[in-house]
Image: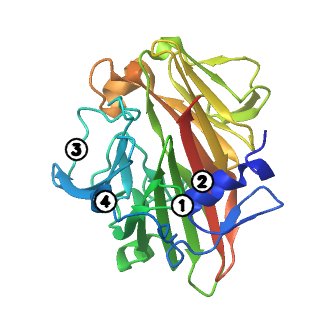
Amino acid sequence: MSPYDLDRREFLKRALGAGLVVGTSGLAACAKAASSSAPAPAPSAPPAPSVGVRGRVGQLETLTIRHSSGSAATLALQGAHVTSWRRANGEEMLFVSESSPYVPLEPIRGGIPVIFPQFGNRGPLPQHGFLKTASWEVVEVGRDPKAAAFALLRTRDTDATRALWPHPFRATLRVTLDDGLATAITIENTGDAPFSFECGFHTYHRVGDLRQVTIRGVERARYQDHVAKDVVKTEVRSPLRVRGEVDRVYLRRPDRIFIRDESRDRTLIVDRAGFGDVVIWNPGEAKARTSIGLADGEYLTMLCVEPAQIDPPVQLAPGSLWSGVQRVHIA
C-alpha cells in the first residue's frame, strides 16, 4: 500500500501538525508551514508541564518529550537529532554507538540524523549535508488534540551554510510520540530562485541480532548498490536478509517496510510520505571497526532503514514547501 493512499492521511496530518496536500507526482507531500501552524492543545486537556524536559548529554543540550503511556523520546538540539526512543516498558528502539561523541560540531553515530541538502557523498558538501550539526531552536513543545506529545524545532540558513550551499531556506522538524514515533521535516525555499536538494532520515534501528532480522517491502525493487559502485540491480530476495556490508538505495519504493527481528520477537512497521526512496545500510564487521568507529560487535545490533528522497532530487520553487514524513511503530 502506497504511503500516499487516502487512508494514511490521518497519520500524515498528525506527524506534520498541519493540513496536508498530497502531490500527484509522488515526489513530495506539501504541508502548511509547520513553523507557523503548530496544533493547539485540546480545550479540555489540562496543562502538562512535564511533557518536555531540558537536559544535557555530554556537551550537547537535549530535550526529552514524554507520552502519558510512559514512552519518551530525546533530541539533541544540535542537528534536531533524535538520540533515543524508549517504549513505555523501557525498551530502547534506536541504536547509538557507545563510542559516539556528544560534542559540538561532531555528528552523533546513531539515532535519527537529518540528511539535507545532500545524501552521503553524492556531491561537494560534507557527508549527508550540514543540518546534522546545525543549531536548532525549540519552537513549541506540547500535546496535540489526540494527546500525542510533540516537539517542534526550526533552523534556517546562516553565513556558514551559505558558504557551502548558497540558498536561503527554512527547515522545521516535528517529532510526535504516541504508540509510535513520527518525524516530519518541512523545507521552505525562502529565496527568490529555485533550488534542488536531497533529504532523508538516517534512522538507526536497534535490533537484538542482525543475523535474525528480515526486511519486507523491497521485493522486485530496483536499487543502486553503492558497495558495487552504484550498479543498478533488481531485488530478487524475499524477505531480504542482511549479510555483510550492505549500502543500497531502493528507488521509488512506495510500499510499507516491515522489519522482523526474531531475536526480540517483534516487527517494526515503517510508513513514509514525501520520501520516495528507501536506503538500507549496515557497514558490516570490517568497516564498522576500521572506518565507522563502532565498538566491537555493535554492527550486529543496528540496522539503518532510511526514508529518503534522492533520485530524483526535490526541485523547490521560491516560496514553496516540501515535506517528508516517517512513522515507526510495532505491529
Say what secondary structure mark 3 lies in.
loop
Q: Amino acid at mark 3?
A: Pro
Q: Which residue is mark 3?
A: 101
Q: Which residue is mark 1?
A: 185
Q: Nearer the viewer, mark 2 or mark 3?
A: 2
Q: Specify the quadrant of the image occupied by residue 154.
A: bottom left
Q: Earlier in the sequence, mark 2 or mark 4?
A: 4
In the displayed structure, 148 sits above or below 217; it is below
Q: Which residue is mark 2?
A: 325
Q: In x, y percent, where is residue 220?
A: 80, 27
Query: Residue placed farthest to the front in the image?
Result: 44
Q: Nearer the viewer, mark 4 or mark 3?
A: 4
How far is disc 2 from disc 4 in space, using C-alphas?
20 Å
Q: Amino acid at mark 4?
A: Gln
Say what secondary structure mark 2 lies in.
strand
Q: Are marks 4 and 1 in contact (CB under 8 Å)?
A: no
Query: Residue placed farthest to the bottom in the image?
Result: 192
Q: Which residue is mark 4?
A: 78
Q: Earlier in the sequence, mark 4 or mark 1?
A: 4
Say what secondary structure mark 4 lies in.
loop
| Residue toward you, 265 or 290 | 265
In the displayed structure, 80 sits above or below 226; it is below
In the displayed structure, 135 sits above or below 261; it is below
Q: Are marks 2 and 1 in contact (CB under 8 Å)?
A: yes
Q: Earlier in the sequence, mark 2 or mark 3?
A: 3
